[in-house]
Structure formats: C-alpha cells, structure tokens
Image (cartoon, rainbow, N blue to C red):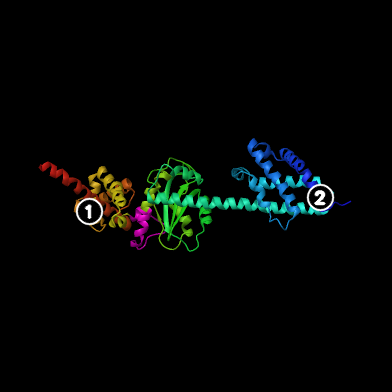
Amino acid sequence: MPRSKAETLDWLRRISGELSTLTVKRLETELPWYSDMPPGRRSAVGLVAQAGITSFIAWYDDPKATPWIAADVFAAAPRELLRSVSLQQTLQLIRVTVEVFEERVSGVSEELREAVLLYSREIAFSAADVYARAAEARGLWDARLEALVVDSILSGETDDELPSRIAALGWHGHGEVAVLVGTTPPQLDVDQLRRTSRHMKADVLIGVQGKRLVLVIGRAEADAPDGDDDEESDGAAPGPGFMEIAAALERGFGDGFLVLGHTVPSLVDASSSARSALAGFAVAHAWRNAPRPVHANDLLPERALVGDAQARTTLVDRIYRPLQAHSSDLVLTLWAYLDNGRSLEATARELFVHPNTVRYRLKRVSDVIGWDATGAREALILQSALILGSIADHERARPASRQAKR
C-alpha cells in the first residue's frame, strides 16, 4: 500500500542517521581518496553528506516554500575543504550518496525516487556553482596580487614580501627575467598571452597601466641560454631568447612601439629591466625605423639624450670603458672612423695606417663590445658612448687637477 507524503517524511527522518552511516561506509570502500584524507577532513566530508540528506528531507517536505537549499549543503564544510577536495571528487561524493539513497528508498515510492534524482541534479549544479565562485574569487585575488607585484617591479619598491607574493602566484620562471612594455590593445586577451608564453617555454606576469601593457617574462625551464646575452652558451640545448619570446607575444599588444628591457638575473631584479623598457618606450618614436619589438639597449642614444642616467651609465660602462681598458688604439680608431663619416680610407690617412689595419681594429671593437661600427644605427650608439665617456673622464679629471694645484 503506497505511503502518504507525511508517512514518507516521517520514515525518511527516522532513517536519516542510518543513511548517513551507510554513505560514510560506502565512501570508505569506493573512494580511495576519501580513505587517504586526514581524520578532520574525512569528518568534514561526512558532515557534507549528512547535510545533503537533511537538506533533501527539508526540500521534499515543501520544495516551494524553501528556496533551493542545495547551496547550504556545502556551508557545513570548512573553507579549506574546497581547496583539498576537487570538483571531480565532490561529484563522486554526490554520486555515492545518491546511490545509497536510491538503494534504501527503492520500492517505497516512484515519486520519492524522482525527487531524489531531481534533487541530486540540483546538488550537482550547486557544487559546480560553489567551485566556480571559489575559482572566480581566486582569479580576482590572483589578478589583484599580480597587479600589485607588477606595480612593485615598475616602481622599484620591492620588499621582503615580494618573493612570497610571487610564489603565491605560481610563478614558474627560473633564473633570468626581462620586461616587455607596449600599448594595451582594445580587447586584451590575457589567456592568449599566457598560452603563447607557455608555448615559448616561458612564464609571464601581466600588468595593465592605462594605455601601457607590461609583461614580466621569465623562462619556465631552468638553464635555457638566452640568445640576447653577450655571454657564450655553455653547450646547453638552445632555447628561445627573450627577443624571440617578445616577437611571439607581439600580436597580443596594441599598435605602437614594443620595447624589451635588458636581461636581469632574477625576478627580484626585474625593476632594472623595467626601467630600461619604460625609458625606451618613452623615446622609441625618435627612431624613425625602430623595429617591433626593439631592445631597450638599441635606444640608448635617445634615452641618454632625455637624461636617462641608466642609459648613460650603460653606454659608458659597456662600450667606452671596455674599449679603453683593452686598447687605446681601438678608441682612437673608432673616434677617427666615426668622425670621418665611416670612411676606411679617410680614417687610414688620418691615422697613417693601411685601410686593412682599420678594418682589423674595427673588427676587434666588435669582438670586445658586441656592437659593429660599420652599421649606421650601431655607429650612433658607439659615438654616443665615446662622447659620454669623454665627458665622464673630463669630469673625473677636474677634481684631480684642482687637488694637484692645492
């Protein structure tokens, strides 16, 4: 004889404890991950299952008067449970609970069986919603943290907490880092930038500052040599250089200039690369045929002209001082070559040497500093370095001469 709804409800309330016990036993036998959990978390999962049974009975009593309390089922779980139990495991938990419920109420009422199926569906949707909200909250928190880290790098205001913040973002970069600065596109596709970086075996931190888009790039594999560095490879398998990575990421930026800062040893040193990239981005328009992307060191003359102290120091320390330390003949030959409009014959006549000697010395210049004086753009960089180096030498000599007079 079919039971009335009131009788079914009384019966369900009487067996709710039995259902909870059966569910926990079934979880232990069918779900290995449940048995491997610490006792506290197993207890929390059991509370979720028990809350689901109680919630179903309340809903079955009056589904219209009670707003869907499926979401309340997960309120019984501590917040850390969402981080230790995946959505897939949660759905397995729901499946086991429903199977136990169906087996126990089998033959009681077809209406009750349909109600169980309907409610289990809502529970599954509710679980997906809970995890989606958690993922969204995590994503928003990550985005804010990422923006904070990028802002710290750009401003140079790094502190002891920066490494822990970087670790919290799941940074996979190893070793050297470079900063890429360009314009923000009308429709920024952050996911595409991350996919491209992963394809290039790199990791990125992304920051948007109005019309500027800033990417902090690091390799996701350790010990990959950089094609942009002056140091020779130690024989490791070649990997993409930062300029190659920047070229792959180029389509994710808006129209305009794209400047790659110099390479630094680690992420905590990225402020130096960021300064060079930002300085280069500010003056890139002064180079009529600037490539995209362009290295910040290729914009050293323009940066020095607007008062960039880092550019002035780089020109003197990386070009003038090494040449001066290597040979005064190289400095003299380079001066003469540039002053004579890059004419080998005119330079040879001024120095009273053969043109082949000039060629040899210019090749030695390239070997020492990595820039080739025979190219128009690199000649501008070298001439700027000679001018700034001479000024620096003169400034250093003045105090010494004054001291000698005294």
Classify mark 2: helix, strand or loop: helix
Q: Mark 1 points at which residue?
A: 336
Question: Where in the figure is residue 38, as x and y percent of width and height?
Answer: 63, 36
The C terminus lies in quadrant:
top left
User: Looking at the image, do the residues carrying marks 1 and 2 touch, with CB atoms under 8 Å apart?
Assistant: no
User: Between residues 44 and 3, which one lies in front from this camera angle?
Assistant: 3
User: Between residues 77 and 173, which one lies in front from this camera angle?
Assistant: 77
Magenta span: chief secondary structure: helix
Please say whether residue 208 is one of the residues in the magenta stretch: no
Question: Where in the figure is residue 100, as x and y percent of width and height?
Answer: 77, 44
Earlier sequence position, callout 1 versus callout 2: 2
Question: Where in the figure is residue 361, as x and y percent of width and height?
Answer: 27, 48
Classify mark 1: helix, strand or loop: helix
Kindly identify the amino acid type of the residue bearing the numbered disc 2.
Thr
Q: Name the residue under label 2.
A: 8
Mark 1, residues whose alpha carbon is within 10 Å: few (<14), some, or many (≥20)?
many
Return the mark for residue 269: none
Segment tinted magenta in the rendering: 277-299
Residue appearing at x 46%, y 47% in the figure: 218
Which numbered mark, 1 or 2, is in the foreground of this view?
A: 2
Question: Where in the figure is residue 308, as x and y percent of width and height?
Answer: 30, 54
User: Between residues 320 and 348, which one lies in front from this camera angle?
Assistant: 320
Query: Quick check: 44 left or right of 322?
Result: right
Mark 2, residues whose alpha carbon is within 10 Å: few (<14), some, or many (≥20)?
some
